[in-house]
Image: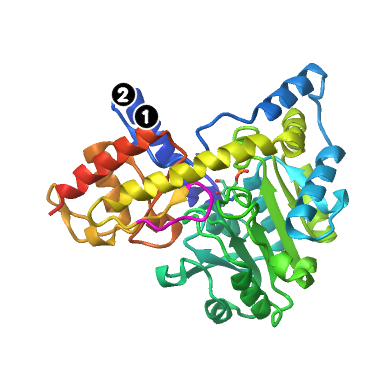
Amino acid sequence: VKLSNRVANLKPSPTLMLAAKAKELAATGHQVVSLAVGEPDWDTFQVAKRGGIEAIEKGQTKYSPSNGIPELRKAIAERTTAEIGITYSAEHVTVTSGGKFVIFSALQALINPGDEVIIPGPYWVSYPTMVELAEGVPVCVPCDQTDGFKLTPENLRRHLRPKTRLLILNSPSNPTGVMYSEDELLALAKVLRDFPNVMILSDDIYNRLVFEKSVAPHILHVAPDLVGRTLVMNGAAKTYSMTGWRVGWALGPLPWIQGMTNYQSQTTSCAPTMAQVATLKAIQEGEPELKEALTELKRRRDFVVGLLSNIPGVVPNTPDGAFYVWPSIKAHLGKKWNGKTLTTSSDFSAALLEDQKVVVVPGIEFGLDGYVRISYALKDSQMKLAADRIRAFVQVLL
Ligand SMILES: Cc1ncc(COP(=O)(O)O)c(C=O)c1O
C-alpha cells in the first residue's frame, strides 16, 4: 500500500514507542525498568471508577453532544474559573476524546498552511508533529538550563514574526517538570501585547500536579486582557489518573471553541459518555484523593532527585510539578560504551537499555540534547533498582 505523504512521513510517538519496547522486552523474560511512562502508576480515582460504573448501569452509554455533556461542561467552567480567575460558562467549553485530540483539533481549527507556531523547547513530543499535520510550521525555540528551560521574553520576541499565529505554553512542563512563575508569565504577556494577532494555547494538563501551590500560575491570571486570544486546555488523564478514559477539554473564545466542536463532530463525534460522567465525578469529588496522590508524588520527587544526585555525571533538576525529572547526562556524552561513542542522548538511552534494561526517553526527542526524561510515577523499589542500574551503566563508560 502506498501511504499518503502525510502519514508516510509521520514518526510514531517516541514515548509511546519506548513504552511498547519496554513491554516487549519484559514479555521475553527481561527484567526491564521503564522510566518512560507518561502516566501515574496509581489507580484511577475511586470516585471516577464508581461514576463510570454507575453511568454504564444507568445506560449513559450512547452518543453525547459533540462538545460534551452539559453537566460536565458546567463543572469544567466552574473549576477553571476558580483556578485562573476568568469567568467561563459552559458554552466556552468543548470536551473531546483526550487532551491530545483537544490540541490536535485546536490546531486544525486555527492554523492555515504556512502559519508559524512557537513551541518553547524542551517541548512535549507531539506538538511539532500536530502543527505539521495542520500544515503549519513549528518554530521550536530552545530554552536553556540557565533560563530554567523556560521561554524568556527576549527569546519570545526574537521568534515572533509576521507569520506567527500561535504560541504554545505548557506549565508544569512535560518533559522538565518546571513551572512558570506569575512574574515570568507576566513578562511574556507584556511581549504578546505588542503582537495582537498571536494566539496562545495554554496546555494546563499538569496544572494540579504541583508541589508548592494548589494550582500552577496561569497567563490569564496575570494578564486577563489576553482572554480573547487564549485557549486553555486540560483533561482528566493526569490529575485523576484517567489516562485510558480519554477525556480532555478546552475553554476559550467562542469561534475557536465552535470550530473545534465542528471538527470533532466530523471526526470523533464525542468523548465516551460514561468516561465523561466519571470525569464529572472526579471534578466534583476527587479532591481528597488528589491530595493523597500529591503527597506521595512530592515524596517520590524528593526520593528520585536524591537517588539521581548520587550518580556520577547525572545532574537532576528539581521539578516543580508533573511526574518527570530532567537530568543532564552531558558529562557522559562523548564517552564509549562497548566500543561505540555515545554522541547524543539517543545513543546514551539506547546503550542504557541494551546494557541495563532501563528505559529513559532521550532529551533529543523533546528538542534539547544532553538530557533524558525520567518519569518517577513509579514505586520506590523500581526507582531504586533503576538508579542502581544507571550507576552501574555510567561506571562502565570510558
Ligand atoms: C504536555 C501534555 N499535553 C497533553 C497531553 C495529553 O494527554 P491526554 O491525551 O492523555 O489527555 C499529554 C500527555 O502525555 C502531555 O504530556
Q: Which mark is residue 24?
A: 1
In the image, residue 90 sits, relative to residue 221, either above or below, namely: above
The answer to whether the residue labelled 1 contacts the one labelled 2, judged by CB atoms less than 8 Å apart, is yes
Q: CA distance from mark 1 to mark 2?
A: 7 Å
Disc 1 Cβ-to-ligand 1 distance below 8 Å? no
Residue nearest the viewer, comparing 1 with 289? 289
Q: Residue at x 78, y 60 (%)?
A: 85
Image quarter for residue 271?
top right
Horizontal placement of 342 versus 56: left or right?
left
Horizontal placement of 236 versus 225: left or right?
left
Q: Residue at x 68, y 66 (%)?
A: 219
In the image, residue 397 sits, relative to residue 138, either above or below, namely: above
In the image, residue 364 sits, relative to residue 249, either above or below, namely: below
Residue nearest the viewer, comparing 26 with 295? 295
Residue segment shown in magenta: 316-323
Q: Is 16 part of what is drawn in magenta?
A: no
Residue nearest the viewer, comparing 216 with 30? 216
Give the x, y percent position of residue 253: 81, 61
Residue nearest the viewer, comparing 35 with 110? 35
Image quarter for residue 61?
top right
- Which residue is disc 2 drawn over? 28
Q: Which quadrant is home to the C terminus?
A: bottom left
Disc 2 Cβ-to-ligand 1 distance below 8 Å? no
How packed mark 2 is, by other alpha carbons closer than 10 Å (few <14, some 14-19, many 20 or more), is few
Q: Is 317 part of what is drawn in magenta?
A: yes
Q: Amino acid at mark 1?
A: Glu
Q: Callout 1: helix, strand or loop?
A: helix
How packed mark 1 is, by other alpha carbons closer than 10 Å (few <14, some 14-19, many 20 or more), is few
